[in-house]
Image (cartoon, rainbow, N blue to C red):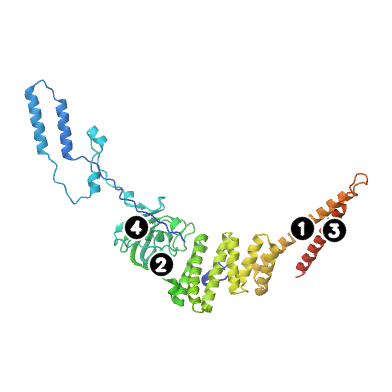
Amino acid sequence: MSSIDAENNSSDKKEETNLSNGDETLVVCEPENKDTFAKQPCCGDTAMESCSDKENKSTLQDQDSLADVAESSQNAVNSIKSPPIDTSCSDAVSSAAKPSNQHQQRGTTNDSSPPTEDDEWLDILGSGHLKKKIIREGEPNTRPTPSCQVVLRTKGTLEDDSKLVDVNDRVAFAAGEGDVVQAWDLVVSLMCQGEICLVKTTSRFAYGEYGRAPDVPPNAEIMYELELLEVNEPLDIAMLPEEQMLNLVDAKCIRGNELFQRKEYMQAVSSYQKGNNFLQQHMEREEEEEYVMSSAVKNMRIRCLNNLAATQLKTDAYKECFDTCEKVLALDKDNVKALYRCGKVMLRKGESSSAIKYLRRALELSPNEKVIKLELQEATKLNVANRKKEKDLYQKMVQGLQRSDSQPEGKSHLNHPGRWSNYALAAAVVAVVGMGIFYFIQNHRQ
């Protein structure tokens, strides 16, 4: 493809489909343990209740029989005293094991039911799209905060055919910045260092409706096993050496390109903006020392901004796209991609004259670009149509004035004091029309 749609790392291979996106941090509180425990009465209470029932049912006709009932009741109470309490049990289990008032009134007990598989999973978002199950607890108070540098071990299994995907011994990234699979980014903020967990995710938080060729099909649900190996402090971007900073920006651009290809434009915008922010922080620090931008930084900034503008154009964010292109042109006034996108934005807004100016300049710099030629032809057609509308409007105005002045003398208002003002208005309209035609001819010749 030509240079207008080509970018480093295949970021902008075709304008209509390819490149020339904070993520927000979701704070999820872990719910308390909701495991269902069997509610059973203690044996002492049951015995007392049983004996009381016997006493209620006994008759007072025979004194000897009544004595026997009382004696047997006392023996029953003495023989089934409650065993000593096991202090190792948690308060939650003890309280959950008490019978409900309803069961006590009925004199019945609830059958023990073991916890189901769903009770072991934490529904992170409450929608069923992302669930987490802890296999091994991690170190307390070691959860990463946003932008912390973390290292994960990952292993994914497709739910449909059990095929392994995303098997990595070590994956390093900044938490909460959208650099990895979204399911990892959300779950890692709920993990502690050393923790191992299983994660069930739908395609919404994995690879979406387009998948990832060739190993992940569209709309694939994935089961991940994740282990949080390391949690480190966030990087101080402003203090990084230039080479390391450029590597980080390059990673942001690559991630943005992947998201762009899957048409996840908002996340792609976020990645490009973070990369541009890294460059900005670096330059602001260096400006204190009379910083002179190196060619490597300049080229990376142009690349990042161009990719951002392409994504903004896809989301119809015309003002933002134009502003981004203006930043590129401030660094390189003859950047073909920025000129082309400025022209395209003006065309989408219906400003054909401005669109022609940008597109003509872009075509002068890259005369073989077909996509620029097509946009210029469309802008020219729109400009002709706009000029014709203006001309027709002026003609209607003049004709209306002429009809009003051509009425019979007895019924006309020729002698009206304002008739000369009408003539002056007509002359002004004619002059404006003439000037419009003159400028149209001049632009057409150019």
- Which residue is found at the position 36% from the left and 65% from the top? 152
Q: Is residue 231 above or below residue 73?
A: below
Residue at the limit of the structure toward the left, as seen here: 64
Q: Residue at x 65, y 68 (%)?
A: 372
The Cα–Cα distance between marks 2 and 3, rounded to whole angstroms, is 71 Å
Mark 3 secondary-structure assignment: helix
Tell me the number on the disc at residue 390.
Answer: 1
Specify the amino acid type for callout 1: Glu
Q: Residue furthest top?
A: 61
Give residue 173's mark.
2
- Sequence-first tag of 4 and 1: 4
Q: Distance between the Cα atoms at labels 3 and 1?
A: 16 Å
Q: Quadrant of the N terminus?
A: bottom right
Nearer the N terminus, badge 3 or badge 1?
1
User: Residue, x 85% and y 58% (percent of image)?
Assistant: 427
- Quickly name the residue at label 4: 198
Q: Amino acid at mark 3?
A: Ala
Q: Residue furthest front?
A: 417
Alpha-carbon span between mark 2 and mark 4: 19 Å
Q: Which residue is mark 3?
A: 427
Q: In this rendering, does residue 53 appear at all?
A: yes
The answer to whether the residues at label 2 and label 1 have Cβ atoms under 8 Å apart is no
Q: Say whether residue 171 is left or right of residue 378.
A: left
